[in-house]
Image (tube, rainbow, N blue to C red):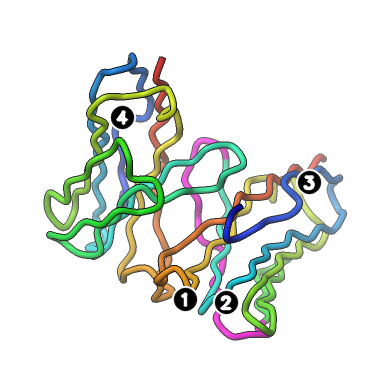
Amino acid sequence: TQLLEQSPQFLSIQEGENLTVYCNSSSVFSSLQWYRQEPGEGPVLLVTVVTGGEVKKLKRLTFQFGDARKDSSLHITAAQPGDTGLYLCAGAPKAAGNKLTFGGGTRVLVKP
Amino acid sequence: NAGVTQTPKFQVLKTGQSMTLQCAQDMNHNSMYWYRQDPGMGLRLIYYSASEGTTDKGEVPNGYNVSRLNKREFSLRLESAAPSQTSVYFCASSELRQGNNSPLHFGNGTRLTVT
């Protein structure tokens, strides 16, 4: 069982639709990071959320950190083919000595 | 800036062979990391170096060794490769050590197949 559980594992949608990716844990995190990875490349940081209840927006992407700092979500509005990729959440739980742990990832495919 | 550079990009080994994966960063970062990525498993930490001169085990260190050669370079060695080590390996660096919200900067990976 992974410390960070992402759902769904795979999402296929049409261009223009909305989608939400979830990152859940039973542990408390001081912060959570979201990365996007494209084929043949390494992950690239999208955002870091630090405060419980925090909402951050990056163009059409909205990131939310749960009030209890145990979960996070990524919502994409009007998805475009360029949003296709593997989305990874990562956090450093206090219970694990602040070592960064990654979720299993959500593979998103946006079809034109 | 090149960022994080990994070599080689691809490698095929036979069981029992050894090899070293090279990683260099030009961002003057203090911390460096080696991860492996397997389908559905996300990224799992193999070893990390919080600062020059120190290395520590991560989640899956068995079968690997590392060397922090200097502040720029962090290598990963497989002494006797096994099929279970078939994976994509990523090197990463960060300005601060983990747990300080410091973002990780990744290389483009080494795809290793062990037959």
Name the subunit of mark 3. A
Question: Does A36 appear above or below A41?
Answer: below
In this figure, which residue is indicated by the disc labeled 3?
A11
Coordinates of residue A35 in the picture (x, y in percent): 55, 58
Q: Report how far apart the C-alphas of labels 2 and 3 lie in the structure.
A: 27 Å
User: Looking at the image, which is closer to me, A68 or B91?
Assistant: A68
Which residue is denoted by mark 2 in the rendering? A28
Residue at 32% across, 57% down? B93
Residue A49: within the magenta?
A: yes
Disc 4 with disc 3 on a shared chain = no
Q: Look at mark 4 in the image and give the residue it sits on.
A: B8
The magenta-colored residue range is: A39-54
Question: Crowdedness of circle 4 by 10 Å Cα count: few (<14), some, many (20+)?
Answer: some
Given the image, on which type of amino acid does mark 2 rest? Answer: Val
Structural distance between the alpha carbons of marks 4 and 3 = 32 Å
For label 1, the residue is A94
Q: Is residue B53 above or below residue A106?
A: below
Horizontal side of residue B90 vs B19, given as left or right: right
Position of residue B114 in the picture relative to residue B51 (left or right)? right
Under tag 3, what secondary structure?
Answer: strand
Q: Earlier in the sequence, mark 3 or mark 1?
A: 3
Residue A92 percent coordinates (x, y): 47, 69
**In the rendered structure, which disc, 2 or 3, sits on the residue that comes first in sequence?**
3
